[in-house]
Amino acid sequence: MSMPLELARQLTEEQIAFVKRSGLKAEVLEAGHVRLRMPLAGNQNHIGSMYAGALFTLAEIPGGALFLTSFDAARFYPIVKEMNLRFRRPATGDICVEARLTEEQIQHLQKQATEEGKAEYVLELQLTDESGEVVAESRGLYQLRRH
């Protein structure tokens, strides 16, 4: 069973000190669906657009947020095995990312991790500005592991 949503929100936004300092906010936390926002304020680089590290953080955190809303933390834990980020254009405002896993994917991953000790999955995401323009694309390889 996944954890209560308010606890998932607190862990997503505050568990990692860097994430807390960045001001990242979880706008949607549901089983199989998360939407996160990284504010430009406080995350600018030397030319006034969003710092690459803040964009990378926004691309990586959905894997953990999806874990918190979709899997039983008493039985499993997540790790990120690989992360690639392609920058498309400067991010000059707040940036959002959405990630989804279907109920079928969640069940399959839990079954595989239970039987084999681990299960891998890929999240391919688009980081978008407030007008919907893609500023970066990410591909993360995650692993669900059995405790």
Image: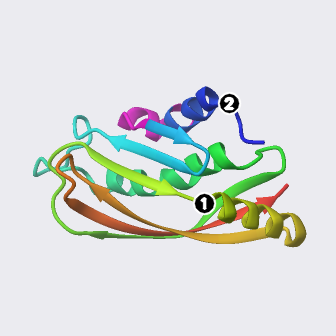
x 76%, y 45%: residue:
73
The quadrant holding residue 102 is bottom right
The image shows residue 139 at horizontal and vertical percentages of: 45, 71
The image shows residue 84 at horizontal and vertical percentages of: 42, 72
Camera-nearest residue between 86 and 112: 112
Find disc 1 in the rendering and name its residue. 102
The image shows residue 90 at horizontal and vertical percentages of: 15, 59
Q: How far separated are the C-alphas under marks 1 and 2?
A: 19 Å
x 73%, y 70%: residue:
119
Magenta residues span 14-26
Q: Residues within 10 Å of mark 2 (few under 14, many from 20)?
A: few
Is 49 placed above or below 21 here? below
Is residue 25 shown in magenta? yes
Q: Tell me, for residue 4, which label it has, or none.
A: 2
Camera-nearest residue between 62 and 51: 62
x 23%, y 41%: residue:
40
Q: Quadrant of the N terminus?
A: top right
Check disc 2 and give the amino acid type. Pro
